[in-house]
C-alpha cells in the first residue's frame, strides 16, 4: 500500500513546500491510458473503437500547421484562407496530380486514414476523438458545430492538431513523474534503463451522443476506498441536491463492484456519467492520481490530507479495544417482538428469542462492525446556488489554453523573460512596419 507523507507532523516544524503526493510512476500513467483499461471495463463505457497509431501519423500530429488530406467522399471545403494555417490538397484543383500527391499527408498512413473513415461510418456518422489520455475539448472552437462532433477524418485531424491537451499527451505524457529523477541520474551514468517506455498511442473514436453535463461526476479513490465525489460542470443545478443520497449510492455500488479490486493502482481518479433514470453508471475516463488531474470543487491538498474511511475505521477499532479493556459491552436495543399467532407451540417465538439473545451476546459483533462501516460516507460536493463562480458564463471554457505559447513561457520566466519578450515583439513589429512601407513605396512607383 502506498504511504503518504505526514503533513501534520512536518507542519509544526516547517510549512509544506510541495503537495504530499505518493510517488507518481510512469506505469501509473500508462495504467490510466484508455487503451490499458478499456478492454476490462468496456461493458460500462460508451461505445468506442481504438485505432493504433503509427510513428508517421504521430509525426503528422506533431508537425506545425494543418495540412488536410483530400476528402474524396465528402463535399470539398474551400473556406480556409491564407492566414488560417489550414490547408487542404483540394484547394488548388488546377495543380498537377504529382503536386496533389505531395500535398496529401495521408499517403504515409493510408491504413489509419481508411480506418478512421470506416469507423465514423460504423458509429453512425458522428464520433468524438481523443488520444490515450486527453480529448481535444479545448479545440472545439475550430469545429463548425463548436462541439466535439466529428463527421469526417478531416474534422478529426483538425481537432487533434489544434488541441493543447493532445499536444500534452504527445510531448509530456510522463512529465512530473517521480521516475524522471532516476532517469536523469541513469543518463548521467550512461545507463540504458533511462529510456522512456514505448507509449502505444491509440486514437479513440467514441460514438457521439449528447451528454447532460449536470450528471457528470469526478470520483477520487485513495487506498482503494472511494474518498470524495465532485460535480464536473461548474454550474448550479437545483434538482441535484435532493438526489445526493441516490447519486452517491449508485456511484459507491459501481465502484465496489467493478473498480475497487480490479484497477491495478490503489490511488486513481475516475469520471462517470449517470443518465436519467439515474440508476446506471457509465465509466467515461480514468485519470492519474497526480497534480495534472483537475480536482474541480476540491483542492489536492484537501484530498491528500483529509480523513478517509481508513482513519475512521482505525479510530472505531481503537475505541472498541478500549471499551473491551474497560469491561464495557455494546448492546443493540430492539423493539420487543409480538408472538406470531400462526407459529405452532411458540416455535417462532423461541427462534426470535434465540436471535435476540445472539444479538446481545458480546461475541457476535458483526452487526456492530457493519454499522460502524456504514457511518462513514464519501462527500459528494455540488456547486452551491450562492457560489459566484456558478454564474461566470462570460469566461469561455479552457480560455487559459488559448494564450500564445511564447506569452506563457515569457510569464513563467519572470521579469527578465517578459522584458526579453517585449523587446522581441518590438523588433517583429518594426520589421513588419518596414516591410509594409517598402510594399507601399513599390506600389507608388508602379
Image (cartoon, rainbow, N blue to C red):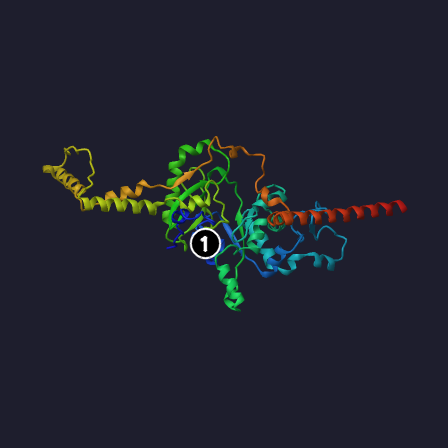
* Residue 290 falls left or right of residue 408: left
* Residue 387 falls left or right of residue 106: left
207 vs 389, nearest the viewer: 389
95 vs 35, nearest the viewer: 35
Crowding around mark 1 (Cα neighbors within 10 Å: few <14, some 14 to 19, many 20+) is some
Instruction: Please identify the residue farthest to the front as the structure is shown.
Output: 13
Q: Residue at x 19, y 46 (%)?
A: 325
362 vs 218, nearest the viewer: 362
Residue 60, quarter of the rendered image: bottom right
Residue 265 image offset from top left, x and y in percent: 41, 54
Residue 135 image offset from top left, x and y in percent: 54, 48
Residue 155 position (above or below residue 278): below
Residue 274 visible here: no
Q: Residue at x 37, y 53 (%)?
A: 261
Residue 429 image offset from top left, x and y in percent: 75, 46
Residue 318 position (above or below residue 111): above
Residue 236 image offset from top left, x and y in percent: 48, 33
Instruction: Please identify the residue farthest to the left as the structure is shown.
Output: 345
Q: Which residue is mark 1?
A: 37
Residue 296 visible here: yes
288 vs 90, nearest the viewer: 288
Q: Residue at x 49, y 54 (%)?
A: 33
Which quarter of the figure is the N terminus placed in? bottom left
Instruction: Please identify the residue farthest to the right as the structure is shown.
Output: 445
Amino acid at each position: 500500500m502506498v504511504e503518504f507523507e505526514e503533513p501534520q507532523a512536518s507542519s509544526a516544524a516547517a510549512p509544506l513546500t510541495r503537495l504530499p503526493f505518493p510517488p507518481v510512476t510512469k506505469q501509473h500513467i500508462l495504467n490510466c491510458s484508455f487503451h490499458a483499461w478499456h478492454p476490462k471495463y468496456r461493458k460500462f463505457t460508451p461505445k468506442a473503437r481504438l485505432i493504433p497509431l503509427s510513428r508517421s501519423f504521430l509525426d503528422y500530429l506533431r508537425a506545425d500547421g494543418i495540412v488536410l488530406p483530400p476528402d474524396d467522399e465528402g463535399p470539398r471545403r474551400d473556406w480556409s484562407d491564407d492566414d488560417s494555417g489550414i490547408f487542404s490538397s483540394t484547394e488548388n484543383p488546377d495543380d498537377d496530380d504529382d503536386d496533389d500527391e505531395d500535398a496529401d499527408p495521408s499517403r504515409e498512413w493510408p491504413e489509419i486514414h481508411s480506418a478512421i473513415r470506416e469507423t465514423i461510418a460504423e458509429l453512425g456518422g458522428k464520433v468524438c476523438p481523443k488520444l490515450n489520455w486527453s480529448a481535444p475539448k479545448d479545440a472545439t472552437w475550430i469545429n463548425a458545430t463548436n462541439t466535439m462532433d466529428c463527421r469526417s477524418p478531416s474534422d478529426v485531424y483538425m481537432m487533434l492538431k489544434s488541441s493543447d491537451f493532445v499536444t500534452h499527451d504527445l510531448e509530456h505524457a510522463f512529465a512530473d513523474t517521480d521516475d524522471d529523477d532516476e532517469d536523469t541520474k541513469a543518463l548521467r551514468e550512461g545507463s540504458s534503463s533511462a529510456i522512456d517506455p514505448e507509449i502505444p498511442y491509440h486514437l479513440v473514436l467514441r460514438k457521439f451522443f449528447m451528454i447532460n453535463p449536470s450528471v457528470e461526476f469526478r470520483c477520487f479513490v485513495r487506498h482503494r476506498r472511494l474518498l470524495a465525489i465532485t460535480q464536473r460542470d461548474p454550474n448550479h443545478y437545483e434538482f441535484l441536491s435532493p438526489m445526493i443520497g441516490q447519486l452517491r449510492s449508485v456511484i459507491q455500488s459501481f465502484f465496489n463492484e467493478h473498480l475497487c479490486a480490479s484497477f491495478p493502482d490503489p490511488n486513481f481518479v475516475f469520471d462517470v456519467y449517470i443518465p436519467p433514470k439515474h440508476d446506471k453508471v457509465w465509466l467515461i475516463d480514468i485519470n492519474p492520481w497526480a497534480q495534472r488531474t483537475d480536482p474541480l470543487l476540491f483542492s489536492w491538498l484537501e484530498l491528500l490530507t483529509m480523513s478517509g474511511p481508513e482513519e475512521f475505521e482505525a479510530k472505531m477499532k481503537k475505541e472498541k479495544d478500549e471499551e473491551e479493556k474497560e469491561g464495557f459491552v455494546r448492546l443493540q436495543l430492539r423493539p420487543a417482538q409480538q408472538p406470531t399467532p400462526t407459529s405452532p407451540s411458540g416455535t417462532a417465538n423461541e427462534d426470535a428469542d434465540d436471535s435476540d439473545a445472539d444479538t446481545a451476546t458480546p461475541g457476535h459483533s458483526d452487526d456492530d462492525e457493519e454499522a460502524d462501516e456504514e457511518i462513514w460516507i464519501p462527500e459528494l460536493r455540488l456547486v452551491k446556488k450562492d457560489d459566484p463562480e456558478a454564474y461566470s458564463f462570460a469566461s469561455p471554457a479552457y480560455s487559459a489554453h488559448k494564450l500564445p505559447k511564447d506569452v506563457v513561457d515569457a510569464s513563467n520566466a519572470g521579469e527578465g523573460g517578459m522584458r526579453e519578450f517585449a523587446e522581441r515583439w518590438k523588433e517583429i513589429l518594426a520589421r513588419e512596419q518596414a516591410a509594409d512601407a517598402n510594399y507601399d513605396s513599390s506600389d507608388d512607383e508602379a
